[in-house]
């Protein structure tokens, strides 16, 4: 989930610790990569945030790409957020940075969804599939790429897909398939979390397709196919030699 942008001037005791504690109460544990409000790298002044956004576009190395994947999804959650307009201005300039977009496309196509091979479909049904890494994250990455490549500055994944379709950056079938896949995978994930919590187990994102009803299993497979097809369309943006 996008991290709130906390001004550096906010006291850590009353600001970032409260944010971290609130996320924990809601079931979101601390990020293993340190992307939390308590980390000074994610708590900066407005001028430093603006420069960081510019650096992500101008110097698209691995660290900046990872940072962009999180920071560029920022959302206004409460109160005034004077920092938003200058950051949006930077994001709107993303189409003018083909090097950044090429590397972003590479990341977006790096991890294919866990599709079953036709010959080993029976084995796939008995293997654990990570719904987040194999489904939700790839769709969010695709939506982010098409948004940034076309000057779209909104953050929610479904809204980005709709906007990209309206601009003609995504054809109707691809955009609709990704939206349906995103909604379906999220629902399967939430259902599993609810079942695990009722059973007194910690919720996770792993599921075996053979534990789903036949129609749901088929829909999951089709969702992964939609993701793979959309990733394949980005091959023309991937840098040569990668």
Image (tube, rainbow, N blue to C red):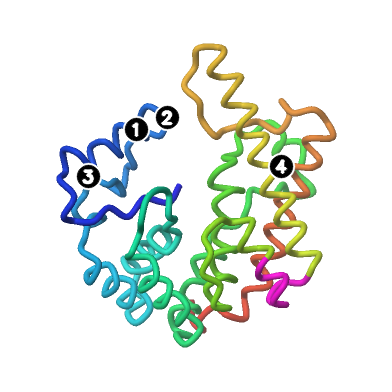
Among numbered discs 3 and 4, the one appearing first in the sequence: 3
Separation of residues labelled 3 and 2 (CA atoms): 17 Å
Separation of residues labelled 3 and 4 (CA atoms): 33 Å
Separation of residues labelled 2 and 4 (CA atoms): 22 Å
Which circle, 3 or 4, is nearer the viewer?
A: 3
In percent of the image, x 69 and y 77: which residue is there? Answer: 167
Among numbered discs 1 and 3, the one appearing first in the sequence: 1
Separation of residues labelled 1 and 2 (CA atoms): 6 Å
Which circle, 2 or 4, is nearer the viewer?
A: 2
Q: Crowdedness of circle 1 by 10 Å Cα count: few (<14), some, many (20+)?
A: few
Q: Which mark is residue 38?
A: 3
Q: Which mark is residue 22?
A: 1
Q: Crowdedness of circle 3 by 10 Å Cα count: few (<14), some, many (20+)?
A: some
Q: Which mark is residue 26?
A: 2
Specify the quadrant of the image occupied by residue 122: top right
* Residue extent of the magenta highlight: 163-171
Q: Eyeballing the image, is 228 above or below 163?
A: above
Please say if the residues under marks 1 and 4 sit with CB atoms less than 8 Å apart.
Answer: no
Which circle, 1 or 4, is nearer the viewer?
A: 1
Residue 198 as seen in the image, left or right of residue 119? left
Helix, strand or loop status at disc 1 = helix
Which circle, 1 or 3, is nearer the viewer?
A: 1
Please say if the residues under marks 1 and 3 sit with CB atoms less than 8 Å apart.
Answer: no
Residue 208, horizontal then vertical, whole percent: 66, 31
In the image as oriented, which residue stretches furthest toward the front? 80
In the image as oriented, which residue stretches furthest toward the right? 215
Q: Is residue 167 magenta?
A: yes
Residue 26, horizontal then vertical, whole percent: 42, 29
Q: Which mark is residue 184?
A: 4
In percent of the image, x 79 and y 67: which residue is there? Answer: 172
Residue 98, horizontal then vertical, whole percent: 48, 85
Q: Eyeballing the image, is 83 above or below 96?
A: above
């Amino acid at each position: 989930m996008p991290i709130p942008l906390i001004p550096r001037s906010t006291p850590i005791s009353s600001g970032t610790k409260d944010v971290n504690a609130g996320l924990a109460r809601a079931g979101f544990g601390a990020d293993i990569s340190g992307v939390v409000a308590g980390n000074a790298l994610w708590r900066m002044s407005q001028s430093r945030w603006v420069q960081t956004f510019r650096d992500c576009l101008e110097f698209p190395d691995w660290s900046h790409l990872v940072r962009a994947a999180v920071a560029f999804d920022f959302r206004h959650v409460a109160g005034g957020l004077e920092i938003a307009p200058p950051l949006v201005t930077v994001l709107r300039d993303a189409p003018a940075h083909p090097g950044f977009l090429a590397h972003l496309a590479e990341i977006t196509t790096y991890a294919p969804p866990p599709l079953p091979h036709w010959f080993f479909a029976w084995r796939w049904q008995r293997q654990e599939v990570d719904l987040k890494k194999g489904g939700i994250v790839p769709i969010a990455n695709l939506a982010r790429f098409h948004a940034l490549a076309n000057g779209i500055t909104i953050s929610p994944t479904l809204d980005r897909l709709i906007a990209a379709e309206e601009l003609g950056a995504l054809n109707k079938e691809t955009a609709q398939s990704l939206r349906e896949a995103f909604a379906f995978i999220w629902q399967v994930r939430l259902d599993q979390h609810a079942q695990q919590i009722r059973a007194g187990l910690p919720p996770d994102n792993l599921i075996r397709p053979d534990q789903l009803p036949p129609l749901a299993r088929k829909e999951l497979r089709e969702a992964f196919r939609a993701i793979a097809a959309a990733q394949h369309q980005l091959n023309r943006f991937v840098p040569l030699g990668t």
